[in-house]
Image: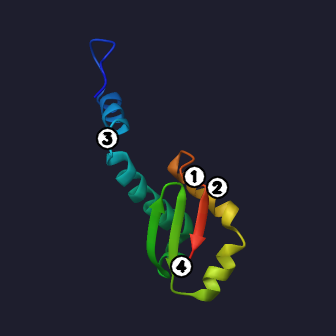
Amino acid sequence: MSKRTREHMSLAEGLQDFLGNSKLQKGLNKVSAEEAWHTVMGDAISKYTTRINLDRDTLYVALRSSVLREELSYGKEKIVRLLNEELGKDLIKKIILK
């Protein structure tokens, strides 16, 4: 944890400071990206999703339907924008549909 510059720190500030200086943020980003996918894409697409993995700034999504994969490939930029809006930060730069 970094040195405090003031006497008191809020709990939120303390947690952000701790996460920023640890490897936990990477794991939390993976979980957040998966939750964002299910929220943004809805139940209809989520039921065809078999695996989601965030590696650096690329989201890998495995789908059971080749037809759905083809349809989603046309709107990758929009999906990235919607996911980043849901996450509240620019975490995802690219999506690879498998």
Above-or-below relation of 82 to 14: below
Tell which tag, 1 or 4, sits nearer the viewer.
1
Q: Nearer the viewer, mark 4 or mark 3?
A: 3
Between the C-alphas of marks 1 and 3, the distance is 22 Å
In three-dimensional space, the C-alpha distance between marks 4 and 3, rounded to whole angstroms, equals 36 Å
Label 2: which residue?
Answer: 81
- Which amino acid is tagged 4? Ala
Tell me the distance, in whole angstroms, between the alpha carbons under discs 4 and 2: 20 Å
Crowd band around label 3 with a 10 angstrom C-alpha radius: few (<14), some (14–19), many (20+): few
> In the picture provided, is 3 more to the left or to the right than 59?
left
CA neighbours of label 1 inside 10 A, class few (<14), some (14 to 19), many (20+): some
Residue 18's spot in the image, x, y percent?
A: 30, 35
Please name the amino acid that badge 3 sits on. Answer: Ser
Helix, strand or loop under label 1: helix
Residue at (37, 46) in percent of width and height = 25
- Left or right? Give the position of 71 relative to 18: right
Q: Amino acid at mark 1?
A: Asn
Residue beneath label 1, please? Answer: 84
The answer to whether the residue labelled 1 contacts the one labelled 2, judged by CB atoms less than 8 Å apart, is: yes
x and y percent of residue 3 in the render?
Answer: 30, 19
Q: Which residue is mark 3?
A: 22
Q: Secondary structure at mark 3?
A: loop
First of labels 1, 4 by sequence position: 4
- Is residue 13 placed above or below 43 in the rendered structure? above
Dot 4 or dot 3: first in sequence order is 3
Q: Which of these two is toward me, 46 or 50? A: 50
Work out whether mark 4 precedes mark 2 in sequence or the reverse, and give the earlier one.
4
Closer to the N terminus: mark 2 or mark 3? 3
Q: Residues within 10 Å of mark 2 (few under 14, many from 20)?
A: some
- Check the picture and name the quadrant holding the C terminus: bottom right
Near-viewer residue (64 or 85): 64
- Counting from the top left corner in percent of width and height, residue 47 is at 47, 80
